[in-house]
Amino acid sequence: MAAASHKPLGAITAGDLAAAAPGTDAAALHAALRRALGAGDADPAAVWGELCRSLLRPDVPFAVHRMLYYGCFAGLPSPTPPAWTPDPEEAALTNVGRVMEARGRELLGDAYKDPITSFPDLHKFSNENPEAYWKMVFEDMGVEFTVEPSCIWRESDAYPGGEWLPGAELNAAANCLRAKPGRSSEDVAIVWRDEGKDSEPLNFMTLEELRKKSSLVANALDALDLPKGSAIAIDMPMNVNAVVIYLAIVLAGYVVVSIADSFAAPAISTRLKISEAKAIFTQDYILRDDKELPLYSRVVDAKAPMAIVIPDAKVTMLGLVPSIARTWKNTDCTAGFDWSTIRCFSSSGEASSVDDYLWLMGRACYKPVIEYCGGTEIGGGFVTGSLLQPQALSAFSTPAMGCHLFILDNSGNPLPQDSVGIGELALDPVLFGSSTTLLNADHQEVYFNGMPVWNGRVLRRHGDEFERTCDGYYRAHGRADDTMNLGGIKVSSIEIERICNRVNDAILETAAIGVPPIGGGPEQLTIAIVFKDQSTQVEDLNQLKLAFNTALKKLNPLFKVSSVVVVPSLPRTASNKVMRRVLRKEFTQAAQAKKSKI
């Protein structure tokens, strides 16, 4: 951890604490700090754990949390010190811990010790024995096949990653709506509060009620006589109706096309055409900050097919995207909330920031943030955190079960396993849930052509830039290809550039780049501009940025340009393709140099 600007804990004075948090009892905070340092354990992780337990309550100003966190690990070479360490008793209560206690010796033999110690062994077992591992997972989850597979996995000439569950048939929604062993149909499945009704009681829906409602919608879909396997879209906010509808579409044998409710009509239309959706579920409006924002009219403007209009929970796992955490932190809108029931946070969708997630953990007395990264095209995640491993901020502690990760060097070859490095991420193609076809594009071209071979298999392209640290953690650094992740929504650079190119007649071309901010966090949209006349002078780039943002509302009102940069030309390959990766690197380095000067 780079900590040149942070005092080590032993050097922090009461005056430092008073300056960081005016109005607090700095003397009492300093006395508690000295007691933690005098506990006798020199391990920084242990000292940090003691500070979390004895001093760093949610009501202590975040400036103090931040000072003590960086001070605790000051001088260490690690960029990913542990912000949370698992407790053996709690680890045994997790799903994977429970399975390991019950079947650890069966799977790992005498090598099995306990869930925490043997977790890396289980991961290795999942890669080397997919037949045994996934069969065990299906049994534990109570997955029921309509037609049993002939095997779990087999080699295939048609698919680089082989063939999973050949011959099997099952309905995922039917499995979700079936009570598992030890559970009841009367168990609560969904807890929610309606938008704009914060003072009203919570709503509850049992598994049986969810099954009945989903079946009702599924039967209504069947009455439309659409061909089985047809695509049906959902353009709705995440509410209980959307959950019911999603399950119903799958239950009835159709394919779900999810469309973000923030998209404008042209973007909705594009996604409907590509997916060839036969129908779409939506609602008349969305309620945001007591304002009614039209949704149905946007769907109508998109010339959609048949439209079907749908006129305090004690959470233990809170899922979110980093942009939400940053907003909460910057606005302090969660001050005074009781989050004591939270056991962990789950984060996905975009890169996160160390400071934002240090703040987030502090709101719940330092419960861990489990980072999770994946994608629709691989049916889940490929890298994640685990409650059986120490967790570092804004980092992943392990590849997902059954998954091998590779970081490619500048020549496109895999770095040695477990070595430190940063580069484009590639995956072992033998990955449960990974796609074999791609809508509107050539699957082989997108994911496999031009990729290196490892152990006789062509690696699968993913498109993210990843780092492996000296501690074995992984960090995401945004997209390495021509795709961006803006507010958790994946969008093509070309889609944004097409709009920006038409904003001003003086513009020859633009390049849209997602640039990670200094310190990490969600990508920020930067537009590089090439003018037709190199002598063109723009006195106020903010006016151009405003024009870009106004135009981008036609794609998605949530997409915001953070900066505009004028360049003489765009870097290109020999085949004239824009090298956005080069621009991203240049802009990132320029931002880092500017910060260093400051």
Image (cartoon, rainbow, N blue to C red):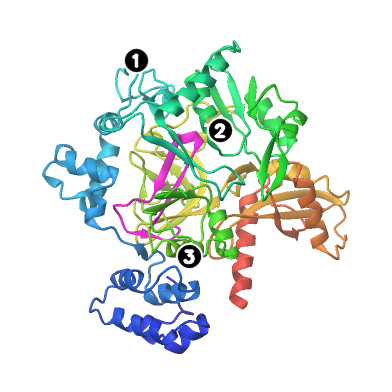
Residue in front for this viewpoint, 523 or 365 = 365
Residues packed near mark 2 inside 10 Å, few (<14), some (14 to 19) or many (20 plus): some
Residue in front for this viewpoint, 568 or 105 = 105
- Residue 562 versus residue 120 in the image, above or below: below
Numbered circle sitting on residue 359: 3
Q: Which residues are magenta?
A: 368-394
- Percent x, y of residue 235: 63, 33
Q: Quadrant of residue 137?
A: top left
- Percent x, y of residue 437: 51, 26
Q: Are marks 3 and 2 in contact (CB under 8 Å)?
A: no
Q: Earlier in the sequence, mark 3 or mark 1?
A: 1
- Residue 540 versus residue 523 in the image, above or below: below
Identify the residue position indicated by label 2 in the image.
242
The Cα–Cα distance between marks 3 and 2, rounded to whole angstroms, is 31 Å
Identify the residue position indicated by label 1 in the image.
147
Dot 3: what SS?
helix
Looking at the image, which residue is at 30% across and 78% down? 36
Quadrant holding the C terminus: bottom right
Q: The disc labelled 3 sits on which kind of residue? A: Trp
Asked if residue 403 is among those painted magenta in the image, a careful observer would answer no
